[in-house]
Amino acid sequence: MGSSSRFSEPTNPKPNSPKTVTALRFSELFNLKLSENSRLLAFFGPLSAARLNRESDFDAVKLDPSEMAPPSAGNRHGKYREASLNLPNRHSLMPVVRRCWNHPLVDASAFVNQVYIMLVKTDPVSMEKTAEFEEGLEVPEGSVEQWKENGLLELVTGDYVFCRDRATSNNPADDVLAIMITGEEHHDAEARQEFDSAVRALLAVGHDGSTALEAEPQARKVQKARCYTLGNSVERQRRALAPAAAGKSEPGQKEKNVYQTLAEKLLKASSKMCETVSKLLPKKVQTALAANREVVNHPVVGTVDNLMGASVQINISKPLREDAVDRGIQEIGNFGSAHFDAKDHASSYTHMISNSVLPAGCEPGYFHILQLGAFTKLISFRGTVFSGRRKHGGTSPLLPTAVSAEELKDAFRFNAIHFPTSMSLDGLSRNALGSHPSKPRKKVKAKGKGKRVGKGNGKGKSARTQEDTDSESEGEGEVSEDGEGDKEDDDQVPFYVTPEMVNKMNDLFVEHASRRATYIKDGGLLMSRDDLMNHIGRSIYQVTSYLWRQVADDLGVEVDQAKHFESITYNAEDGSGRVPLKPWPCAPPISSVSKERLAAQEEFDEYEKKVLRFIPAVARSLPRRANDPLPVPETRTTKKQDQNQYLRAMIKKAERRAQSEKQMMKTLEKKAVERRKPLPQEESAVAWGERTGSDGEKDSEGDYQCRFLDELTSVILSDEVHTLKGELASYQASRPQPTAVDAFSELSASGMDKQITYCEAALHSQKFDNRLYRRQLMLSATAPWRWVDCTIANEVKERLVEREGGNGGNGGNGGGEGEGGSGEGGNGDKRGEDDWLTDMIATMRAMLLKQESTVVLCPKEQPRLAAISSMPFTYSNKFKRSRFQKTGDRLRNAIIETIREALPAWLGLIVEKPRIGRDRRVRAWFIDAITRSLGEDILMTDYTWQAYSRFKASHVIFSDRLYRTKNIEQALMDPFLHSLSQHPILKRGTSAQKTYKRLCNLIPDSV
């Protein structure tokens, strides 16, 4: 691998060019320059009516520059003091930041750099406003210098951020931890080396370009992104918690496979770092989280000293080039953009550890906690402790200009995230402990035996069958022990003591029967032996205590949990002898609740109640406290107090007008379709009596027209022309997009009507931009299938026709001397000479003629196939029972069909759900058909966008054959293509064609 800058933090990172956007974004907000009393009313973005002037409720104390240096060891134990920190242009809905010294919640013996206090208001009204603000935030663009100029706070190793609400307490001991930044200074050399070694082993690049972990078949992506779950995983539909399925052991497996080895090494190294970081948390946080674990007995990763989340996800992505405009991380999907982790436990913390492998001089990327206005650089061993319930996101590393191909191949952005799931920590999940005994066999009726109606009295339900009254005769089958309600998801199923539990055979070992991952079978990959054994022991006790609690109260059953756990021993991991399980004072009650359990629950509840008030996304839904200010009702008086209310009303009016215009257009379109009279015979879209999209069969029910073609009328096209004229005029005359503040400054300083007219023109210009984006989206999204099913399929057909000598299998005009005839079609395979398609055609042709069951498309044996993929692909021949002549239409169609089936599967275009894949494929055919007939200008219309966005394959194919095969026949589109060819828009002189030409002439060639 190339050299990497792992421990340095460049002082002058190269700025990134900000992206030009039309809508107001987070970075624009920070570039706004306001007078002292001005206010922002943003109508182009999600942050409307956000005040940028600072009306601080807190005393401002200037911070001496000398105090910005890290405190020395001598004054860490001195008197607590704090001062305000000046962050220019910081948004008013981001907390005011203060700097403090000698904070009582910070461990002074560890490495500490800066401690910040963020002042927030936790009443429901303020939290509601803050939550709405947070929802609209995105990862800011621009450089680090720009972020700082706009009031963002950069955090480095050893920094702490606490939140405080002065309305409830001004005591620093009551502060709530929001962010903690750790780094190499907090971990010894051995821990760093173990983690670095584990990451490098996992990211080792193979010959095909994939990492060592991703090359293993067990690796499973999360949400189709380049993210992988290694720790505990939650299956939410079943409320099941278990070790990640990818790391489970197969039946009879004795040794760990490669995937398990890589995962175990990383989990062991990262959990050790999490244990160190857990000790840096405030003592009250440690106590509360440990108390909750003692009550719930949720699984951990590593040991119980790891108080971070027990679910682990790793994110892998490649760095971007230095000139990249969009710094988003596309490879990890939603996890690379600004997002909330809504399923995280709100009062616990996520710990993200960075260890990217990058060339020297590479900017490593940054991580933002957005509403708090804080960010940090993701250098190696940088740990970020925060709540996933706060909106957060990151930027990609930027490669330097001069980087070798070898360095680029080995360069990766890597983060390991330990996060807490609410279902696990709240004790609301069903933990997969071990396997059930085998289920009793169901009754199997003997062959030929039926039910004989007995002579019971009554009719219907009163009449019983002979089978119900007679005892089971020998040889007729076995009677199942399952009753009417004995189903896995039935809450009336008894708890059975099965023969396996009775164990009359005195077996000393039970083979694990479950195919799912469980803690007894697979927990050793996640936890140390001591913690795994104690977790299993406590889980079994939870089961037995549940059964004991079903015993009648008057029996007064009691269990001494200390003696119970002391009686269970196991072999120590270091081979030092036998070790008993640890006592569990917080064990579930049987006859009475222990004081230790009550104290632990109270400890965590008090902590959780305080923490939740400081997280906007959570606090907005909490009940109002007695001392919270009441929401101010909106009256005439309060409206008058707002100096900008008039401006707000005008902007809202403009928005409502734009919305009403949009609705009016929809209504007009609907009425136009409803009122449209039948077209004259020469403008008919389909032949009389023929159902569009069917197999050409006559239908006695009348004339059915395809929905999409039926709506494509001259009335609709006229509306499109009228709308497009206004949008295009605004688009061509548009001046550079102003910031929101500039727009509103002009509103207040100049004529109101003039400025509002300009705003409406800007909206029209944006609508035309949307048309361009929609056209590009439709072309890009359908490009793969159009290439496979249209471009490649036609190319294959033409090559085969040329090979056979002109007119397919009949010889025709193709020269009379076989494949090398002198006719026009007898020049051999001249189109596909020396390319991958030539090899693929030859391979499929040979497979069909030899009736082979499978064929392997191997780039090593046929190097030209490497243009498609470096990995071999095995195709199963569905025509293996068919015999083909060496020429002819039948063989040609079979070759095209096999290539249309094999190529998308090899390229990974096939999706799991057949309906989705079918709709996407036919939608591509639809786009190809209308663009071939009408040109790409048709994609600029609202008509086409509505057809595209609501598209289903059944809209253009009515035949039942659509659902019978996985590989849809393109011939099913022939009726639609015929109807399209007969549509008035393609016939000279019709009003539809004239109107469409007017629309096409409006669109400039430059767009």
Image (tube, rainbow, N blue to C red):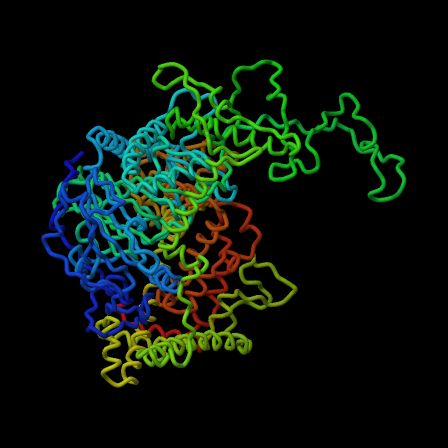
Quadrant including the C terminus: bottom left
Query: Can residue 454 be spotted in the picture?
Result: yes
Which residue corresponds to the image point at 44% horizontal and 52% vertical from the top-left?
A: 921
Query: Can residue 794 be spotted in the picture?
Result: no
Quadrant including the N terminus: top left
In the image, residue 254 above or below residue 28: above
Q: Point out the residue furthest to the left here.
A: 66
Quadrant hosting residue 169: bottom left
Please state if 550 lies on the left or on the right of 748 as rendered.
Answer: right
Please state if 342 lies on the left or on the right of 710 as rendered.
Answer: left
Looking at this view, is 166 or 729 the one in front? 166
Residue 666 lies, in percent from the top left, at: 46, 74
In the image, residue 99 above or below residue 193: below
In the image, residue 978 above or below residue 274: below
Quadrant hosting residue 270: top left
Please state if 916 lies on the left or on the right of 70 as rendered.
Answer: right
Looking at this view, is 785 or 348 the one in front? 348
Please state if 442 lies on the left or on the right of 736 as rendered.
Answer: right
Which residue corresponds to the image point at 83% horizontal and 35% vertical from the top-left?
A: 465
Residue 969 lies, in percent from the top left, at: 49, 49
In the image, residue 415 above or below residue 990: above
Residue 526 lies, in percent from the top left, at: 38, 30
Which residue corresponds to the image point at 33% horizontal and 38% vertical from the top-left?
A: 839
Residue 116 lies, in percent from the top left, at: 23, 52
Which residue corresponds to the image point at 44% horizontal and 65% vertical from the top-left?
A: 946
| Number of marks in picture | 0
Looking at this view, is 797 or 116 the one in front? 116
